Image: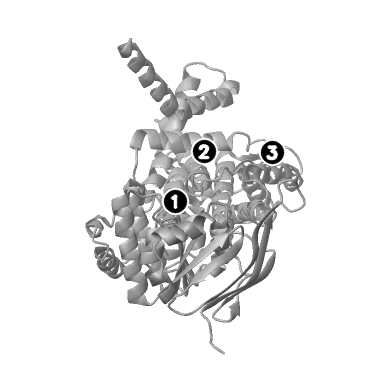
Amino acid sequence: MTAYQFEIQHIHQTFHKGTANEHHVLKGIDLKVKKGDFICLIGGNGSGKSTLLNAISGSFPIDEGKLLLKQKEIQSLKEYQRAKFIGRVFQDPNLGTSPRMTIAENLSIAQKRGAKRSFIKRATSSNAVKQFSKEVEMLELGLENRLNTEIGLLSGGQRQAITLLMSVLQKPELLLLDEHTAALDPKIAKFIMKKTNELITKQHLTAMMVTHNLQDALSYGNRLIMMQAGKIVLDLNQTEKEKMTVEELYQLFSQ
Amino acid sequence: MGIIVSTILQGLLWGLMAIGVFLTFRVLDMPDMTAEGSFPLGAAVCVTLIRSGVHPLIAALVGGFSGMLAGAMTALLITKCGLPALLAGILTMTGLYSINLRILGRANLSLNGYQKMDNLLDSFHFPPYFNMLFIAVAIIGVIVILLALLFKTEAGQALIATGDNEQMARSMAINTDLMKIYMLMLSNGLIALAGAFIAQDSGYADISSGIGTIVIGLASVIIGEVIFGRVSLTYRFICVILGSIIYRFILMLVIRLGLNPNDLKLISAILLAICLALPQLRMKLKQLVFLKKEV
């Protein structure tokens, strides 16, 4: 039996149960993710992709099904407990960082993800700041000279770059990217996508990325999944994905 | 001279309370009404203990500790029972009214003839108010330094992040519920400690002394912000204390001008409303000027 990095077993999710607004969003999702898989997840608005990502990260307790991260059940853990193993980047650049804290302070929060936070030890020691400087340099945005700038003063793109770095500063068992370039201008979106790919490949991360950009979905990752009305309707491996064109994918998408 | 020293002293003692309000309203970004109950709670516990022979410093510390329990109560209502912060605070505050009455036994309890903190320095023969002033400067100085250090630690940064962006804090594996409990305990502990100090300074505990604590606390925070602007958290603590001292001077002037002390709460409320409305009013004024130019 192959040991999967992450398994989704028959997840069901209904919102507003028993009311006129009852909405069955996830209708029995099953997915097996191998270590090092970089999955692109596409689907129309309301198909349930973001709900799936939120169900994995624990934004709400799921109605039915199991989530297995390295064979351990995580579906009953709280959001902050799952965050020890799961890195996240949100669509809204404001969600991933703390605006009144400096770049260095935000990174120090990320560096302690999953570790015990001491009431004695200083968060931004000079050693830590030196390390942050190196990490931020890798983003090639010149932010290494602005480590003491409050995040709230940065642009959306810069904030999203820092959020991306924060999500992988402690290597996550699973990285969840929820349309993380959708709110950015095309140039910075392309740049963030390139950096994302670099980080995932270099650190051999297991990642799931929701995107509306069909080209990105074909260019990046080794697997492509399409959702429709709460179900997985298409699951392409690397070779199938390489044969696919944007036009063909669009045809499938609009069916 | 005496009046100035006594005003500064009042500002310092109430400044400690204002720091407690600052921690919830600004750092945690949560309107916590518990303050109105934890302030007289600290006073009641402290005065009752002194009257039964406990050392005044220990009595004040126990008073502060009782405030931490009150904060924990509100925090549990918010985090475990899912109540809105405002309502949770009001519930605790209302409940505390009865508890405070039970502790005091009646509406007002005097410390006349009992040993108080300022009596500890009697042998130095300082001028009036100076005993308490020295004690207040020492204690509040230590507290501000400890707070400044605390918020620079790893856990302290997690506390700040919880107030600044809760979603981000949770996605960074911070137990935000626990952080809220810590912050409300710390905040109400300081507020009750201030209540204990002020009761010793004024020589009595009063059941209604909690009314308006939020307004006084917020006024100090806002005055500090308006005068000293955007500064780092460490300096913010000092600004809140300075804001509190300035607020006391404003009140003193108002009384000197011959206004009825009974109107003080109304004046405080109006003052705070103006301060809070200032940014909005400024914007409206700008638009008005702009429109006139257009025409």
Q: Is residue A146 left or right of residue B139?
A: left
Q: Are callouts 3 and 1 both on one chain?
A: no
Residues tagged 2 and 3 counted as in contact (Cβ below 8 A)? no
Between marks 3 and 1 in the image, the one whose residue lies nearer the viewer = 1
Q: Position of residue A129 (x, y in %)?
A: 29, 65
Quarter of the image that includes the C terminus of chain B: top left
In space, the residues marked 3 and 1 are separated at their CA atoms by 48 Å
Within 10 Å of disc 3 (Cα), the crowding (few <14, some 14-19, many 20+) is: many
Tell me the amino acid under the disc marked 2: Gly
- Label 2: which secondary element: helix
Residues tagged 3 and 1 counted as in contact (Cβ below 8 A)? no
Q: Chain of mark 3?
A: B
Instruction: Confirm whether residue B281 shows in the render.
Output: yes
Residue labelled with disc 2: B217
Tell me the amino acid under the disc marked 3: Ile
Between marks 2 and 3 in the image, the one whose residue lies nearer the viewer = 2
Q: Is residue A114 left or right of residue B32?
A: left
Within 10 Å of disc 2 (Cα), the crowding (few <14, some 14-19, many 20+) is: many
Residue labelled with disc 1: A92
- Residue B225 to residue B154: above or below: above
Residue labelled with disc 3: B207
In space, the residues marked 2 and 1 are separated at their CA atoms by 34 Å
Identify the mark nearer the N-term, 2 or 3: 3
Q: Position of residue B104 (x, y in %)?
A: 72, 44
Q: Position of residue A107 (x, y in %)?
A: 36, 63
